[in-house]
Image (spheres, coloured by chain):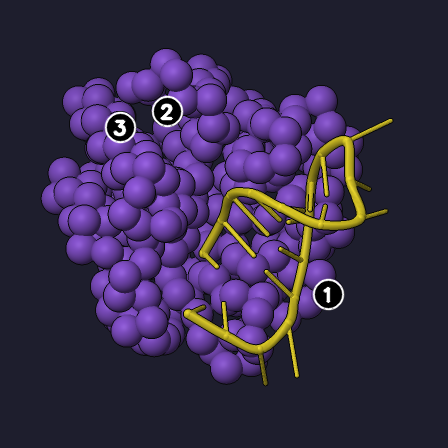
Chain colours: A purple, B yellow
Amino acid sequence: MIVASFNINGVKARLPALLQWLEEAKPDVVVLQEVKSVDEGFPREPIEDLGYNLETHGQKGFNGVAILSKSPMEDVMRGLPGDEADEQARYIEATVNGLRICGLYLPNGNPAPGPKYDYKLAWMARLESRARDLLATEEPFLMAGDYNVIPQAEDAARPDAWRDDALFLPQTRDAYRRLLNLGLTDALRAKTRAAQTYTFWDYQAGARQRNDGIRIDHFLLSPQCADRLQSCEIDAHVRDREKPSDHVPIKVTLDF
DNA sequence: ATGGCCGCTAACAGCGGA
């Protein structure tokens, strides 16, 4: 099965690009981030017409995540546990054919330091706690989405430019590494050490043309899921189409 | 991190994003 993650930066603005990519990539499951739509405004029909079930967790104007799946979804959970007061729509889970799918849109955190950065670090701690709980079940799961984390210098074209940025600060990378140290596998790095495997290029300053990118969209796999990993690919060509998102899809093929 | 961006909002300017 193919599972993909795509930060689409507005589901209404991106609908044609999303549908084109779905038709060509034919993923079985997709987690979307930054849908920027309330659930009632989500353009369900054209996606359902392609054979997908759809679970959304949106809010007005910002954030918002969703899961698409050709197979039925069970036990849908909206919101990341650990803070009842958190109203930002950044997390959704569902089980598909026995595989737990976690879709996440981790906070940007800029400017750092400051309250937004504190929120990012607290959110990452909650994500770690959630990963611990899921590991304890010994059921296969994956956590995919826009992590807003540049894990290592090799994951940016110009790492020096990000030195003081919330996406690359030592505390951010430490928190991400704690997830890996639980026993989760970064699917892309399990398959390649290739340079310039980016998932985001800024709209400004000709970043795509200069390949001035960063790798911030990730698939983390539980041990039982990593055992089934066959391939991990980034659909970078999508960035060169009409009205693209600033992110591109990342997808894994799993032997389930 | 900016060479000039993008999407969203009861919107024609400001915010958030990365």
Image quadrant where residue A191 sits: bottom left
Q: Are marks 2 and 3 on the same chain?
A: yes
Residue found at the far bottom of this picture: A210
Q: Chain of mark 3?
A: A
- The disc labelled 3 sits on which kind of residue? Arg
Q: Is residue A66 above or below residue A176?
A: above
- Do residues under tags 1 and 3 come within 8 Å of each other at their CB atoms? no
Give the number of the disc on residue A117.
none
Front in this rendered view, residue A136 or B7: B7
Q: Is residue A70 above or below residue B16?
A: above
Disc 1: which residue: A242
Q: How much space separates mark 1 and mark 3, taking CA atoms? A: 37 Å
Identity of the residue drawn at 33% across and 37% down: A115
Q: Earlier in the sequence, mark 1 or mark 3?
A: 3
Q: Secondary structure at mark 3?
A: helix
- Do residues under tags 2 and 3 come within 8 Å of each other at their CB atoms? yes
Q: Secondary structure at mark 2?
A: loop
In the rendered image, residue A119, in percent from the top left (x then y), is placed at 32, 34
Other-residue count near label 1 (Cα within 10 Å), few / some / many at <14 / 14–19 / ≥20: few
Disc 2: which residue: A80
- The disc labelled 2 sits on which kind of residue? Leu
Q: Is residue A191 visible?
A: no
Q: How much space separates mark 1 and mark 2, taking CA atoms? A: 34 Å
Residue found at the far left of this picture: A181
Q: Are marks 1 and 2 on the same chain?
A: yes
Disc 3: which residue: A126
In the rendered image, residue A89, in percent from the top left (x then y), is placed at 50, 28
Image quadrant where residue B4 sits: bottom right
Q: Chain of mark 1?
A: A
Q: Chain of mark 2?
A: A
In the rendered image, residue A142, in percent from the top left (x then y), is placed at 34, 37
Left or right: residue B10 compared with residue A127: right
